Image: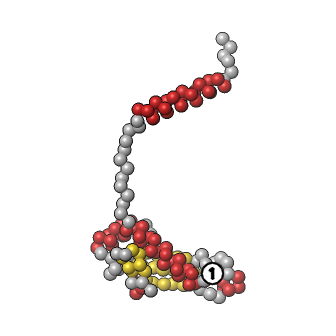
Amino acid sequence: MDLEVSPALTIPASELGWRFSRSSGPGGQHVNTSDSRVELSWNVAGSAALSDGQRLMLLSRLGQRLIAGVITVTASERRSQLRNREIALAKLSDLVAEGLAPEAARRRATKPTRGSNRRRLAAKEQRAATKRQRQRPSAE
């Protein structure tokens, strides 16, 4: 089953690598006999589904998560291997979509307005006056 990340990108099932192992957590006696933990890996560096620009963007943005150009996600939240497979596919899809998302516009630095500055100083003066009233009168 191919993984559709976005309308522009679909990862073919042949590029996805699956591994299964025993999961910790809930499951009772069943947990010791079934391989419900799922590891899904995808070779970003060698994928034919990506354009060169997409590949460079993913390699730079997901560099911390990649091991030799391969990204791996794990899922062991559910007792069922099928549900964990679905969760792993969703995790990979979200991760790739986030890596390919355009960068947010940088914040443009602005000065505080004269009114906001005045209000800030007035509030500061009010706090100082309140604290002055709390002090013991000086013995002069």
- The one of 81 and 104 positioned closer to us in this rendering: 104
Residue 138: x, y in percent? 66, 16
Task: In the displayed orientation, state which residue is furthest to the top.
Answer: 140
Residue 23: x, y in percent? 61, 80
Task: In the displayed orientation, state which residue is furthest to the right.
Answer: 29
Read off the residue under disc 1.
Answer: 79
Residue 88: x, y in percent? 51, 77
Instruction: Give me the residue at 66% from left, 83% from top.
Output: 31
Q: Is residue 61 left or right of residue 77?
A: left
Is residue 132 visible to us here? yes
- The one of 124 and 31 positioned closer to us in this rendering: 124
Residue 136: x, y in percent? 68, 21
Quadrant hosting residue 95: bottom left
The N terminus lies in quadrant: bottom left
Instruction: Give me the residue at 54% from left, 27% from top.
Output: 125
Instruction: Give me the residue at 36% from left, 52% from top.
Output: 106
Dot 1: few (<14), some (14–19), or many (≥20) neighbours within 10 Å?
many
Which element carries disc 1, helix, strand or loop? loop
Instruction: Give me the residue at 42% from left, 84% from top.
Output: 2
The amino acid sitting under disc 1 is Arg
Is residue 67 visible to us here? no
Q: Is residue 35 above or below residue 138?
A: below
